[in-house]
Amino acid sequence: MNNVSLVVTAIVGCAAAIAGGALPVRTRVGAAVILTWGACAAAFVGAVHVLQTGHPMVLNSTRILPITGVSMALDPLGAIFVVITAVVAIASTLYWLGYASHGLSSRTASAAMPVFVTSMLLVPAAGSVATFMWLWEVMALASLLLVLVDQRRREETRSAAQWYAVMTHAGAAAILLALVMIAGHGGGQTFAAIRIHAAHLPTAVRTTAFLLALIGFGSKAGAVPLHVWLPKAHPEAPSPASALMSGAMVNLGIYGILLVGDRLLGGGPTWWWLVVTGVGVISALFGALHAATSTDLKRLLAYSTADNMGLVLIGVGASGLFASTGHPIVASIAMVSALLLTVNHAAFKGSLFLSAGSVQVATGSRDLDRLGGLMKRMPVTGAVFLVGGLAIAALPPLNGFVGEWMLFQSLLHGLPTSSTAVAIAVPVGVAALALTGGLTAAAFVKAIGIGFLGRPRSEGATTAHEVPRTMQFGAGLLAGFCVVLGIVPSIVMPALERAAAVAVPGASARPLSASTDLRLVGFQGVLAPALLAGGLALAFFLVVILRRIAQRRSDLRLTLRSAEPWGCGRELQTARMQYTATSFAEPLQQVFDDVLRPDRDLDVSHLAESRYYTEKIAYRTSIGDVIEHNLYRPIIGAVYRWGLWARRLQNGSVHRYLAYGLVVLVIILAVIV
Amino acid sequence: MSGGGSLVGGVLVAGIQITAVAVGGPLLVGIMRKIRCRLEGRIGPPIHQPLLDLRKLFSKQRMRPEQSSWVFGVAPVVLVATSVLIAAMAPLATTRPPFGRTADFFAIVFVLLLGSVSLALAALDTGTPFGGMGSSRAMTIGALAEPALLVAILAMSIPAHTSNLPALVRIGLVHPQLIASPERILALVSFLVVILAESGRLPVDNPSTHLELTMIHEAMVLEYAGPDLGLVTLGESMRLALLLGLLVNLFAPWGIADRTGAAAFTIGLAALFAKVVLAGIGIATFEVFTAKLRLFRLPELLAGAFVLAVVAAVTALVVR
């Protein structure tokens, strides 16, 4: 049992990729999907075994990769991420079966998808620097191919892929540097060897390596200000790939930070974790604010990913803070909450991206201002999106609520025990968490209300039909997890506790007494999600029954009459009179004007006869990314100018190249002699 | 009548608290209207008028706008259900409500939020400009009020080492000096502003206006009629009563039953009524002398509440 599952995952995953690349178009996707499920199932079984026993799964082979060999070691922390990836991948590939006819059945896509899934399943199992970087790069390249699927049709796709490629490779370079630095000073390149020598590393090396890893993995996790690729690549990728990227891939950024910060370096000084918390706060607020003001459905979801990863980082940072100030139990609670937030995010964001893809397929648009009225036309997709949206807004009885409650509890109980720096950081964290929560609720009321309720705002939305069953099931599976994890989160708690015990240095305690209630051990804090859900359901039926009783007395039957809504006496109401996503977000946009810096453009043209009458008014508004505009554009501009200048070195003249050769030779000789 | 100890007692306590809130909420609204009318020199409707209105509404036929989906019909039920759940669990007349150990303050805030969100969704489901307008404004105010509320809760929870609501109320009984502590007073002001914002009172929203363009809450529920409107009105008045009930119990817990037994519970119920009515009279009086703020001045008010809450949290840490 100990390492068979890793081998099977790798082999079946490769077989899936070959099947996707080699088979004819009719059988290609089906074969690739079934084989990918095999790989996911094998990885899932192995990871669950690791979580149950607590013993890592080890595999070493010198035959596969030359020089370095392959070294795998799956511990409970990694196993959590394998389980998340496997579940999201099964749902997304199920969805892919129905989605394939909408431009995702090419050889490249069918081969890249299994490679992407398999590499994500194996990254958390990597046990050495070389293996890790190898799998990490395969994952990055496979996902890049998937982002590029639509590139022939859309100009934006190419630009998005460029951004993604640059950000992910700059990140990979930072990660490589960090890992090589600690491996070089330590006893070797396997993680086990690094861990033994980590305590003896010079402080400068530890700090530099941690910061580099934070940058590298932070860019993968979409941490602000390294998030710029996220709102570009996630919307442009085909929806099953976006669901995988947002539900599974960004998590691995979090895994990386935990790997380097906690597992390899064994924790660090308080200020490291203050930095992590700070990054989390900024990501959460920035992401939530942009999600609340976005009008593109998938862009909204992508910003909300940055927001959620920010919340996870707050949990990771808080855990580190409490551990570094000597409070391992609160640190464990914070770590469990961070992992729970990750699990939850995978469930709701996966289902949201998949149902957003269904909307795009059914209506041909993902612009909220062109949607509406889909709840009646696509009831299943609408219900799935509703569940996902309410879950992400942290409303009971769904899973997002449980995660946020735990994060609040860890911050509350960590507060009185800690130093001044922590005492200032934590209220700020709570405030950010709360504001994020409010903004997220607004963002998803907008997404659900404008996208699925009311009247259809375009031809495409009017004629929309429900998507194929496989797509409904794929999205519905993950929405089902949102409900189950919201009512009985205790089913994943033992696994998360075991992973947290691995991640938090010096902690072995079980921070939660797991019955169906969530009870913090050592603190007064209890949440009974099942009771809340049951109470809500009971109250709901009580109200319905009382309404019936009240109605029975009247002579009017319970028939529901539908009527024209009130329009201030106007006869005709059109869909264009409704609030749009832009107008819905306008008050928030005004409140946060200084942060968002929207571009507004107002053209008023007057009638020729009299300036007192206007002929037409044109109003344009768009919200760009302030960070992209103020941080990245200048850098890109500088690089471009430098490139132009450097081009002067090459003018095609052989004489000049010979002169360069001579100069370099002289310099080399001068240096050597 | 213990917290989950005896099932019958628990159900009885929950039932009485729910009934008290469901009847008391509309009465509270009636009293507040009466006070306002009297202070403005009018006689005003009798205080049980909201109950009569409810009876009338529930005897009417259900109606819905033609473009709406099932969300429109479900939202009022969810709104009332959230209020019923909180009325059952919260420490209103006793500090030992059934399932009180799970009545976490953060959890209750999120349950309340579920009610607000479902109403905001229903407003968008009407497909009219008023619904969208009300929904957009309500969610904006909600997004800005939530941080103040949650940080205020944090500030109150720090000295108590828990965010369990019955425990927070009880600690005020056991250590009365905590109520006069600076962090509780700052949190009180913050909490009060949030209650005014969440329940749509002046200076945030005018509950008695009927001019569509100036309203927030009324714009959201404009399309409701008959029993559904009855549910919305009932749900809103229950929320007001609940929030005020929590407020008075957190900042003036005296009279609340801290023991089991029918006598203590009855006294607790009477004390609750008296305190909530007093708070309601206070708010109504305040409303007479206040004008509604412009929509875009509201963020300043809510940011003020937020700053107070943060100061409260920091004070709680320094004072400890």
Image (cartoon, grey):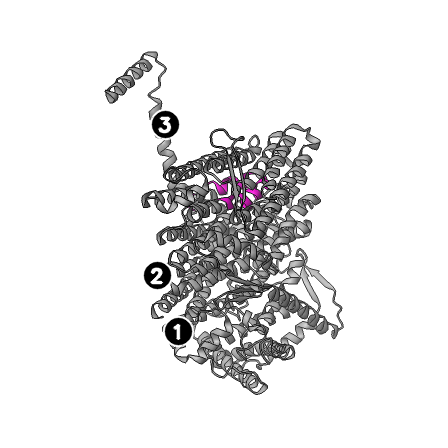
Q: Which residue is mark 2?
A: A419
Chain identifier of the residue bearing label 3 in the image:
A
Quarter residue B82 falls in: bottom right
Do the residues at discs 2 and 3 belong to one chain?
yes
- Determine whether, in the image, residue B226 is placed left or right of residue B237: right
- Callout 3, which amino acid? Gly
Where residue A474 appears, x then y in whole percent? 65, 46
- Callout 2, which amino acid? Ser
* Separation of marks 2 and 3 at Cα, in angstroms: 49 Å
Q: Nearer the viewer, residue A1 or A609?
A: A1
Magenta range is: A224-252
Q: Which residue is mark 3?
A: A643
* Separation of marks 1 and 3 at Cα, in angstroms: 62 Å
- Sequence order check, earlier mark of 2 and 3: 2
- Callout 1, which amino acid? Ile
**Dot 3: few (<14), some (14–19), or many (≥20) neighbours within 10 Å?**
few
The residue at the point 67 percent across, 32 percent down is A28
